[in-house]
């Protein structure tokens, strides 16, 4: 199994709540729809840290090949088109679990 974690900041802080909700809904819309994507969870920061990122994603994939396929999957490509303009400061981490 492979874990994939990504965090972002919302580009427009005046639209943080609305844009974060859009990002969360879009990302979670992929649940159960991409082969090899075992689990997907998206969360919005609760404001605990003084300088947080705003949205986080945790995915589990069967293996590296599934992560590679996900990156090019048409549904993921369409989701990125919607959420990409809303986000900045992307950081990712992947590991074998």
Image (cartoon, rainbow, N blue to C red):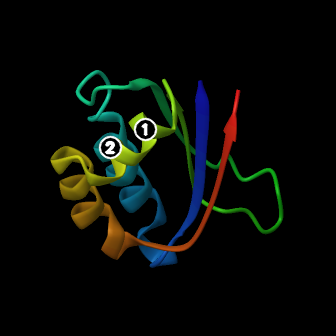
**Residue drawn at the location 18% of the way across and 56% of the way down:** 78
Q: CA distance from mark 1 to mark 2?
A: 6 Å
> Mark 1 packing: few (<14 Cα in 10 Å), some, or many (20+)?
few
Mark 1 touches mark 2? (CB < 8 Å): yes
Q: Along the horizontal axis of the image, is 78 left or right of 8?
A: left
Q: Secondary structure at mark 2?
A: helix
**For the C terminus, which image quadrant?**
top right
What residue does disc 2 label? 69
Q: Position of residue 20 (x, y in %)?
A: 44, 55
Picture quadrant of residue 36: top left
Horizontal side of residue 97 vs 80, given as left or right = right
Residue furthest out toward the front: 65
Q: Secondary structure at mark 1?
A: helix
Give the residue drawn at x 32%, y 52%.
22
- How crowded pointer 2 is (Cα within 10 Å; few <14, some 14-19, many 20+) is rated as some
Quarter where residue 82 is shown: bottom left
Q: Is residue 83 left or right of residue 12?
A: left
Figure check: 13 above or below 45: below
The disc placed on residue 56 is: none
Residue 72's place in the image compared with 57, above or below, is: below
Residue highlighted by disc 1: 65
**Residue 12 % position (x, y):** 45, 78
Residue at image coords 41%, 70%? 15
The percent coordinates of residue 42 (x first, y second) are 50, 39
Q: Between residues 3 and 23, which one lies in front from this camera angle?
A: 3
Q: Quadrant of residue 54?
A: bottom right
Viewport quadrant of the N terminus: top right
Q: Is residue 87 above or below residue 62?
A: below
Closer-to-camera residue (45/7): 7
């Amino acid at each position: 199994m492979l874990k994939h974690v990504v965090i972002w900041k919302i580009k427009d802080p005046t639209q943080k709540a609305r844009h974060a909700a859009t990002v969360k809904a879009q990302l979670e819309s992929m649940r159960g729809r991409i082969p090899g994507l075992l689990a997907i969870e998206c969360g919005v920061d609760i404001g605990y840290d003084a300088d947080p990122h705003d949205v986080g994603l945790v995915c589990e994939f069967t293996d590296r090949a599934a992560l590679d396929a996900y990156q090019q999957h048409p549904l993921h490509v369409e989701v990125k088109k919607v959420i990409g303009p809303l986000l900045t400061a992307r950081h990712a981490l992947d590991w074998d679990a």
